[in-house]
Amino acid sequence: MYSSELIKGTLKTIILKLLSDSDEMYGYELTQRVKELTGGKIQLTEGALYPTLHALEAQGVLSTNVVNVGNRIRKYYSITPTGKQLANDKVNEYADFIHTMTFLLGLKPNMG
């Protein structure tokens, strides 16, 4: 598992990318998808996820849809057109950052 410092710096990018690739997702679904895609190397906590989702919603890059499921209320998040552009920008910025850090730290890119 990766340190919380690394995850904190990439959380918005992760959320925006996942939501740009789907119609809508709820919080627990996001945590499970990240865990699944990373083989458990990244496990998002509710304490990190929900404040970030709420901040992105306040920025207008996410919208929500509240649905009653049985006796529970589930809040689905979807990305706005502005959010899709931000997701694209964040992914490109992160890709450039990885390239820069690989060079800076003298690492050999893993091609396998």
Image (cartoon, helix red, strand yellow):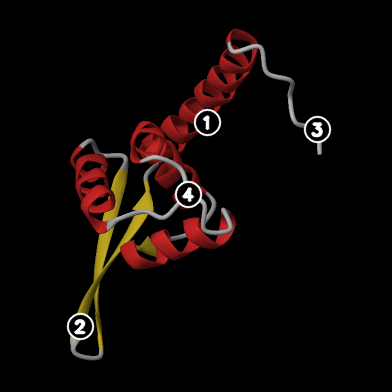
In percent of width and height, residue 11 lies at 37, 40
Look at mark 2 in the image and give the residue it sits on.
72
Look at mark 3 in the image and give the residue it sits on.
111
Q: In the image, 71: left or right of 30? A: left
Q: Is residue 17 above or below residue 33?
A: above
Residue type, numbered disc 1 = Val
Front disc: 3 or 1: 3
Query: Which secondary structure lies at badge 4?
Result: loop
Distance, label 2 to label 1, CA atoms, is 34 Å
Residue type, numbered disc 2 = Arg
Disc 2 or 4, which lies upstream in sequence?
Answer: 4
- Which of the labelled discs sits on residue 1, or is there none? 4
Residue in the picture at 55% in, 62% down: 36
Front disc: 4 or 1: 4
Front disc: 2 or 3: 3
In percent of width and height, residue 73 lies at 20, 77
Query: Which secondary structure lies at badge 1?
Result: helix
In percent of width and height, residue 77 lies at 33, 57
